[in-house]
Each structure stands twice: as structure tokens, then as C-alpha cells.
Amino acid sequence: MKIAVLGAGHVGPVIARLALAAGYEVGIAGSGDPARIEMITEFLAPGAVALPAADAVADADLVVLAIPWHRFPTLEPGMFAGKVVIDSMNHWPPAEAPLGTSEEVARRLVGADVVKTLNHVAYQDMEPAGGRAVGIAGDSPDAVRAVAEFLEHIGFDPVPVGPLAAGRLLEPGSPVFGVAARRQEFENFIKEQS
Amino acid sequence: MTTFGLDTFGDVTHDASGTPLTHAQTIRNVVEQGVLADQVGLGFFGIGEHHTPDMPLSAADVVLAAIAARTSSIHLGSAVTVLSSDDPVRVYQRFSTLNAVSDGRAEVILGRGSSVDSFPLFGYDLADYEDLFEEKTHLFAELLKGGPITWQGKTRASLHEQDVVPYTEPFPTWIGVGGSPQSVVRAASYGFSLMLAIIGGHPGRFAPFSELYQHALEKFGRDPLPIGIHSPGHVAPTDEEAREEFWPHYLDMIGRLGRTRGFATPTPESYAHEVGPHGALFVGSPETVAEKMARTMKKLGASRFDLKYGIGGLSHESLMRTIELYGTKVVPMVRDMLA
């Protein structure tokens, strides 16, 4: 299975490393010319291939959006049709009330199966994943299953939280945001919310 | 050469009864802290620009000039200057002036700023965060070359054969990096030193950043440059005392920051992890802090360590004790461990 990581900033190389360690093939893309991130890839995610975003996405079974939220409108939406897309982004600065980035992502990336996860884990806490519980929200059961499998392989313990709109429960201000929670705490929190 | 320094964000300190001091008194106390840092033999004293009621050090260079007047050997600088929301010409002028006043002891650490209070204050849009920093860093690098400057960009008025004064000796310039690999490459491309801001998680995870930086310097045909570490901490005679003194203020600060920045509220367990061998807080007895510093510096190939001391709610007296213990006990031990 091939993974495309869009974003070579704080988060992208960490997710790329975790995926590489779990045996996935990984393409990574920054903004523009891949030559700009070749050095970063070589040292921070050795084994990943720096590609233009369109090439990375075209090859991939699973796409991870690890770019700042304000860059999202610069992505060409057409290339994501038919793909499973992980939204790991957050509003920055945090919005007054959770707006649900994933619902906006799904609206724009027509034809993609969007799954919200990993956004509530700080990049410095992702490695090693250590069986940490992560919430997973999506409307397509197949996409949620595929992402859950990926998360398990890279070392997390995925906890379904409901449809994509429930991804709001994982956003800044939530009691699980940035917290090293175990499955039980996570499930209790989700139960309280429903 | 290995250099040890202190950084402060100028948090408002409290008196013995827990009452906050005025901004003016807090600032005067920072001057005293800088003077003590020089007296105990430290190599650098830095002030991080902030613009909030609990961190009122918005004009660090003025405070640094006051410290310069009362010291003779310590280097003085920003930690960091939020270049994205400042004018590179003014930053250059202010630190060139500090360099003159201090007889060549100025340094600048440039940052994009993790506290983003300066963006609305000065009318900048956070969405332009990266573009502002990229363009302004380029202008700053041009200014450091000296002589009349010609420059054109989107973030300030163009310059044509413009003299930007005062001319002083070049001063060391660093880029503070919190976790952005692009910033590491950028530092190398301009020939700026790399200051790794390690404020959470395992310090060892920055080792690939050091390698990336050294490789990038080589690729850009530059000589090796120092790598530094900036991390928060607190020193007291015993581990227990240091941890107990620091904890309520750490809990209060991270708890408050968390509401606007999405940090999790610390728990006794997460705190124990951060002050332990795998965390980023250098809190403890001189022996504990020294051992952790030496290990981290070796792991990251760093020749500079700036301990970010002080946190809102501690007293000036407690900060002075940290400075004294750091200069007289911690640093000599680290030097021995690295020798």
C-alpha cells in the first residue's frame, strides 16, 4: 500500500517516518518543486520519495493532509477524487467554536473519502506512537476501516468517534486534544458527548 | 568553544506574598538578573519578545542596552525577535546600536514567533506567517552584509542604494527553530546559526535536525556554524525543591496558554515525564540539570545551551537563585562532563 504525505513541515515528516517504519511506500510533497524538500526528506524521512503533490497523490492508496489549514485552499481538489484522505489539520489560531475542518475538506474535495484523525496529537508526541488512542471520524465505513488499519500498523490505537461531523470532538478545546489518552478514557469521553 | 547562556521571556514576577509586581519593577528586575548572569560568568543573556500583560518585555533591546551599561563580557541578544511582525531595517538598526553600546556583544536570534500576539498588534495576518518570515529573513541577511542596500519585496517599502546605519561590526545571527525543517534549511542557506527551541517532548528527536543543518551548510558551501539549544528550566538546591517550586506556575501558565493555543493541561504524570530524562524541562538540582544538559548537547552536537529560566508567579529572589546555581554549579559540571 502506498501513502502520500502532503506537507513537509512539523507533522508531515513524522507521519512519513512512522509509515516507512511500518513498511509502507511513502511519497512526500511540499508546496511546489520537490527539489525544495529533497534534503528534508533525506534526513527526516529517509526512504520516502519527494514528489510533486499531484504525482504523490496519483500513486497513493491513502493521502495524509499535513499542511497548515490556511494552505488547504491552494490544493488542486480534482486530484483527490476516489482517494481516501486523512485530514490531520486544525484551525489556526484555534477558532472560537469548532468548525469541523473535515466537513470543509469533504465539501471541497468532491469524490474523496475524508477521514479525520491525528489532528489532536502533537507532532512531538507521535513518535513512538506507543499504542496511544487516536480518534477517527468518517462517513465512509470502508475508508474508516482502511485508515484504522493504517493507524494500527503505525502504532496507534484508533477509536471510532462517529461520522465526519463528529470530528469536531477531536478539535482544539476538546478534552482529548493534545492529551495522551488511552482507549477507555477516549470511549468514556465520546459516550458523554453522545 | 562552548557557550552557556540564559534566556527569559520577562514573565511578571511575584513578591513573597504572591502579589504580582508592576511591569516597571519586573523590567528593572530583569536588568538585575542580566547583571548577575554576567557576574556568575555566563556567556549570553537573551530576552524573548512578548506583548502580553503577563510577559511585558516588548522592547527587549532597550533592556539589553541597560544591561550592557553595567556589564563587560556577557553577550546580549534577543530570544527571539519576532521578525515576521517587525521591520528588518529597524531590527538591524536597534541591534547594531546595541552592538555599539556593548562593544560588540550583541546577538540576534530571529524567529517566526510561537507567541503570535504581535501579529494583530502590528496589523499582520497570521495566514502570511511563512511568507513574512521568508522575505524578512532575506532582507535581514542583506542588511548584515553592510553598505548601501537595494531590495524589493512585498512586505515593506523598497530600498534603493539606501544607507542603513549605524555601521558596526557584524554580529552573530541565529534562527530559532521549533520544529520546522524549512527553517533549518533556511538558517543554513543564509549562514545563520541554528537555535533549537526544545520546549516539549524528547530532546533527542531533534538529532535529525542537527544532521540536516550540518548537511545543508555543506551543500550551500558554508563553514560549520554552531548549533544551540534553548529549553525551559529551573534550578534549586534539590530536585524536590526545584520541581515543587516550578510545578504550580507551570500548571497555571500551560493551562492558560492551552486555552488559546490548544496545549493539553499538564498532569502530575506529564510533568514527571517532562522533568525526567526523556522530557524537555530542565528542572532539578544542579547535578540533575547538568547531567541532562550534557547528554542533550552531546546527542544534538550542540556547542551552546541557553536555559530559559523564570516563569510567571515565581519570585525575583527565586530566579536570582536559579541564575547563581546555573552559573556557579551547573555550567562548571556540564563543562567537565563534555571535556
Image (spheres, coloured by chain):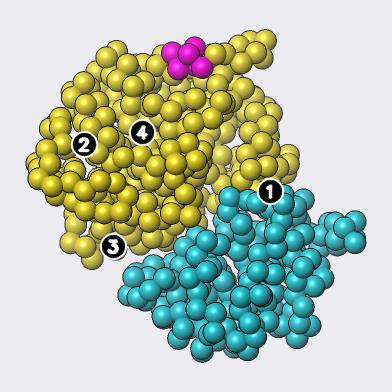
Chain colours: A cyan, B yellow
Secondary structure at numbered mark 1? loop
Tag 3 subunit: B
Q: Main secondary structure of the magenta part?
A: helix
Discs 4, 2: same chain: yes
**Residue found 21% across the figure and 21% down from its top:** B101
Tell me the residue that label 2 is attached to: B171
A48 relative to B263 in the view: left or right? left
Q: Residue at x 72, y 83 (%)?
A: A143
| Bounds of the magenta segment | B23-28
- Which amino acid, mark 2? Phe
Q: Name the residue carrying label 4.
A: B78
**In the image, B111: left or right of B314?**
left
Do pointers 2 and 3 mark residues of a single chain?
yes
Q: CA distance from mark 4 to mark 2?
A: 12 Å
> Image height check: is A34 above or below B310?
below
Residue at 29% x, 24% y is B74
The kind of secondary structure element at disc 4 is strand
Instruction: Give me the C-alpha separation between circle 2 and circle 1.
Output: 42 Å
Please tell me which of labels 2 and 3 falls first in the chain: 2
Does label 3 or label 4 sit earlier along the sequence? Answer: 4
